[in-house]
Image (spheres, rainbow, N blue to C red):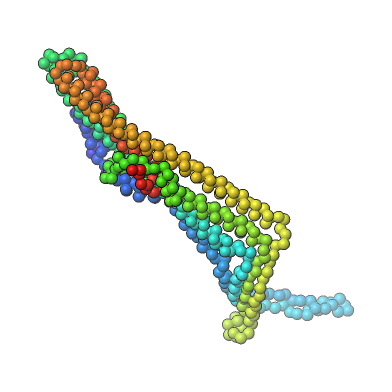
Amino acid sequence: MGLAVVRREWEGRNVSSMLGLVVAVQLAGAPITLDEVRQASRQQLDAVRAELDLQRAGWDRTTARASILPVVRLSMGTGVFYQGPQGGFVDANGTVGTAAPETTRGNFSLNLSLSQLLYDGGRWWNQMAQAGHQEEASKGQLEEQRLASELEATRRFYNLLNAQVQLRALEETVKRSREQVERARGLYEAGRSPRSALLDAEVNLGNDEIQVLRQQQSIVSLRSQLLQWLGRPDAEVEAQVPGTLDFSTPAPAWDASLELARRQRPLFHALDETLRARGLAISLARADYWPRLSASASYGRSAPSADLFFTEPELQNSVSAGLNLSWDLFNGFAHKANEERARIELTRAEKEQVQAVVDLEAELKRTLQTLESELAVLKISERNLEFAKQQERLETERFSAGANTSLDVRNAQIKLTQAELGVVQGKANVAVARAALYRVVGGKVESSP
């Protein structure tokens, strides 16, 4: 059933019936689970970019390894050579004599060469090691980005789930308000209550129905935000309540959480590997001070005609081999500048690592405090909900007996709705806080006894 059907039904139904129709339309969506959302978040755009960076780092490592392998080069060519007449002498009369007539000949060539780097001051093995550390750092960055993407997807999932559960609480409020209207009408018709009480009940019912409709709008927005983060087109989906929600286990201990975070948080693995790569950059810069030694060998064959080139294999051959040494004795202090830049990058990486530890401790403390606060708030909200239920039943019974007014019942209903929404919000906040803790420490952590 779509929105066009909703519009057609509008004229023939009252507000209460219309409200139920809209609710049915909005919630008729395909189920989406938390596990599905967490898995799909690995294909979120930022995570995909990090994965592509890892692939690029892997090929950089292959490129670095190529420097220790020999280079084999084959070249073949054919062409034609023309030489015009050549003047050879001038006689007594000044006449130029022709010493050589014009000539035309072909050129067929084949060259095969091999070169092998033997020593370059340690550059090639440091490049390989550096590329390996950079690849490991990219792995850490990928896992770190996946954790961040998963946390944001989890947060958006619980926002949607929270809104859906709040909707059901508001629907229960509408149901209670409708029952209150029927009680007020019965008391009014029996002459036991003024008409103003009935009108108050009708207005309250209308306001509650408005809240439900606005909550529907919120669900549509939150659903779009979730699907947008997952890179999916907008569709009718409904968040499903996870089967393993934990609202009673206390927050873990600070020391255990900090130790676990330092040990398994992907960010620190990435920083460690980056630090090692920056350290090797200094060794790479120092390699410029040393000579480069390489060996080479080549075979060549050339002939002026195709017959000679292809039918006389024992002729027209040449072979060469040798060692090549090159050494930049002075290049305007460029070697020194490269080394100092590498030292600066190493210092920067060290400072970033120190700051990351400080940031981790601060983030972990905030996350643990948030989780502890949300657990405490949830307990209070659940206690308030029990009190609100008792008060609402009491005021409803007194109203049916004519011992109070509809205003007393309405106040009790408002408190009950607020308490229900408080519990729903509290559970969502606890779930998100636990997910945030998982992201901070880079994995699950045992809670305090």
Q: Residue furthest left?
A: 190
**Image quarter (top left, top right, bottom left or bottom right) of the C terminus:** top left
Quarter of the rendering containing residue 240: top left
Residue 144 visible somewhere in the drawing: no
User: Residue 58's spot in the image, x, y percent?
Assistant: 49, 59
**Image quarter (top left, top right, bottom left or bottom right) of the N terminus:** top left
Quarter of the rendering containing residue 66: bottom right
Q: Nearer the viewer, residue 318 or 65?
A: 65
Q: Going 47% across and 40% down the picture, which residue do you hit?
A: 362
Residue 307 appears left or right of 151: right
Q: Nearer the viewer, residue 385 or 128?
A: 385
Q: Residue furthest front?
A: 449
Q: Is residue 232 above or below residue 23?
A: below
User: Residue 76's spot in the image, x, y percent?
Assistant: 58, 74
Q: Nearer the viewer, residue 2 or 382?
A: 382
Q: Going 60% across and 62% down the picture, which residue do you hit?
A: 123
User: Residue 404's spot in the image, x, y percent?
Assistant: 19, 16
Count of picture labels: 0
Q: Going 67% across and 63% down the picture, which residue do you hit?
A: 290
Quarter of the rendering containing residue 170: top left
Q: Is residue 403 above or below residue 258?
A: above
Residue 345 appears left or right of 415: right
Residue 26 appears left or right of 400: right
Q: Going 42% across and 48% down the picture, which residue do you hit?
A: 260
User: Residue 400's spot in the image, x, y percent?
Assistant: 15, 20
Residue 363 visible somewhere in the drawing: yes
Q: Nearer the viewer, residue 305 or 23?
A: 23
